[in-house]
């Protein structure tokens, strides 16, 4: 009788469950080691923070004084929790999709409004910032995964950038970096309130931002790269030179950077290939950064986009993880919702899919490397360096194990089983390189 491996059977089961239930917590049998969920149960809550007096870019007219408004931001917060008699992990989310006619139900491990694990407390903060358009659930697979490993994760619905509320890009260009900083301060303020579920739980003084596409555009600005002055009056820029305060033209630009931000993960960051960044401004980044990209990204660019950012940020310790032949949507978005897959109108499907890479597999790889990177730079776990200090191309590596332990010849990527790192490259540059 033909033998079928357990790994193949498990993969089939997981793939079927994921396709039927939109599971955001699937870890494939061939996933790298650190993609596995951590030891903490997970709680989740939805908060709404309001930044009073923000410039209203959408209603600003050229040559006229910019009106102000109260900018509301919905934020999904995942956190280590104590379930107690609430039972086992599990919950669901209802979300709009890239196809405006379709709503999806996502299933994960977080329990809505679970009690926070405040006794252990002091968990670093990670802010997730989606693309244009997107929403706070676009990277929910990463939000739950990191919370299970001892992080408080805040994922933003960026007003004027969501599926249901997509406005001209000028608003996003102005607001994205500001939203990220504002949410950091809003969480700090809320955590300081009596009775707050975040009180004693989160350490906002140790924060990282994970930004996808336009989220990466804003994140780079918060890491120390001002936007190029040449784009202040670009056709798509906000009117009345509003963008100037986020460039080196503003003498207070660097004063407005938040020192609580310690590291960043830029997934297909937008802006280099369109002139919003250049080699000179990227020298302002001094914080450790993990860049993630597909080598055929047609939106943010690769050679002239993410790779160019990586090579130009010469004053920072940085890594570039490349999904060979991957496009713009590799790794970051959740898998394609089954509601779109089963619909006669599959508009928006490409927002979640990649022509080469399986979504769950690329999600798992991202979870693995983000875990290693953040554990090292936010928690000081030096053991994670071994997962990042790798030969650039795993195909050139030697896989040599004896009794479950690597031999002296072994230099295959740590955390990956034989053959499972194919199609990836990882490069490392230190400050000055």
Image (cartoon, rainbow, N blue to C red):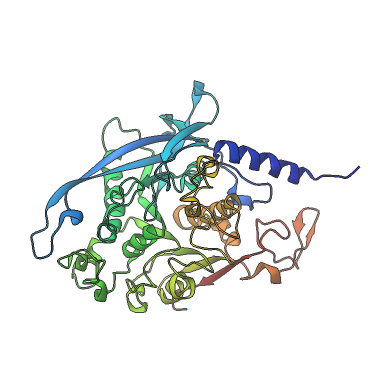
The spot of residue 48 in percent (x, y) is 28, 39
Residue extending furthest top? Answer: 85
Position of residue 119 measured from the top left corner of the image (x, y, whole percent): 43, 33
Q: Is residue 247 visible?
A: yes
Vertical placement of 315 versus 198: above or below?
below
Q: Residue at x 40, y 74 (%)?
A: 315
Task: Pick out the residue farthest to the front.
Answer: 344
Q: Is residue 246 above or below residue 187?
A: below
- Residue 6's place in the image compared with 234, above or below, is above
Rendered image quadrant of residue 325: bottom right
**Residue at the location (67% across, 63% down)?**
422
* Residue in the image at 8% along x and 59% along y: 65
Task: State the image coordinates of residue 158 (x, y, percent, origin top left).
Answer: 32, 49
Q: Position of residue 164 (x, y in %)?
A: 33, 45
Q: Can the viewer see residue 52? A: no
Q: Nearer the viewer, residue 190 or 393?
A: 393
In this rendering, the count of numbered labels is: 0
Check the picture and name the quadrant holding the N terminus. top right
Q: Residue furthest right?
A: 1
């Amino acid at each position: 009788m033909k033998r079928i491996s357990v790994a193949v059977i498990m993969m089939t089961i997981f793939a079927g469950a994921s396709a039927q239930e939109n599971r955001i917590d699937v870890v494939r049998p061939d996933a790298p080691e650190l993609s596995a969920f951590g030891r903490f149960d997970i709680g989740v809550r939805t908060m709404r923070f309001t930044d009073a007096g923000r410039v209203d870019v959408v209603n600003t007219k050229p040559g006229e004084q910019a009106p102000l408004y109260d900018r509301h931001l919905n934020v999904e917060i995942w956190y280590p929790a104590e379930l107690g008699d609430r039972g086992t992990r599990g919950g669901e989310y209802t979300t709009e999709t890239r196809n405006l006619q379709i709503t999806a139900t996502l299933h994960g491990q977080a329990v809505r409004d679970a009690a926070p694990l405040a006794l252990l407390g002091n968990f670093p903060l990670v802010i997730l910032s989606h693309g244009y358009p997107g929403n706070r659930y676009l990277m929910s697979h990463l939000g739950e995964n990191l919370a299970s490993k001892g992080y408080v994760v805040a994922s933003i619905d960026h007003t004027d950038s969501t599926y249901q509320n997509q406005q001209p890009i000028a608003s996003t260009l102005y607001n994205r970096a500001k939203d990220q900083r504002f949410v950091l301060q809003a969480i700090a303020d809320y955590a300081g309130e009596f009775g707050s579920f975040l009180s004693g739980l989160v350490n906002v003084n140790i924060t990282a931002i994970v930004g996808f596409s336009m989220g990466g555009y804003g994140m780079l600005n918060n890491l120390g790269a001002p936007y190029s002055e040449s784009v202040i009056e670009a056709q798509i820029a906000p009117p009345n030179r509003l963008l100037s305060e986020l460039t080196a033209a503003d003498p207070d630009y660097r004063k407005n950077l938040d020192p609580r931000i310690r590291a960043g993960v830029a997934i297909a960051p937008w802006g280099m290939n369109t002139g919003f960044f250049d080699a000179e401004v990227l020298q302002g980044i001094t914080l450790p950064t993990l860049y993630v990209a597909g080598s055929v990204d047609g939106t943010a660019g690769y050679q002239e986009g993410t790779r160019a950012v990586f090579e130009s940020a010469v004053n920072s310790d940085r890594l570039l993880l490349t999904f060979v032949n991957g496009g713009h949507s590799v790794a970051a978005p959740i898998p394609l919702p089954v509601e779109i897959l089963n619909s006669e109108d599959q508009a928006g499907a490409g927002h979640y899919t990649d022509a080469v890479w399986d979504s769950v597999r690329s999600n798992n790889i991202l979870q693995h490397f983000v875990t290693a990177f953040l554990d090292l730079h936010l928690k000081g776990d030096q053991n994670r360096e071994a997962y990042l200090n790798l030969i650039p191309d795993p195909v050139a590596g030697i896989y040599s194990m004896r009794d479950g332990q690597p031999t002296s010849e072994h230099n295959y990527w740590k955390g990956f089983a034989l053959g499972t790192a194919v199609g990836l490259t990882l490069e490392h540059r230190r400050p000055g390189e």
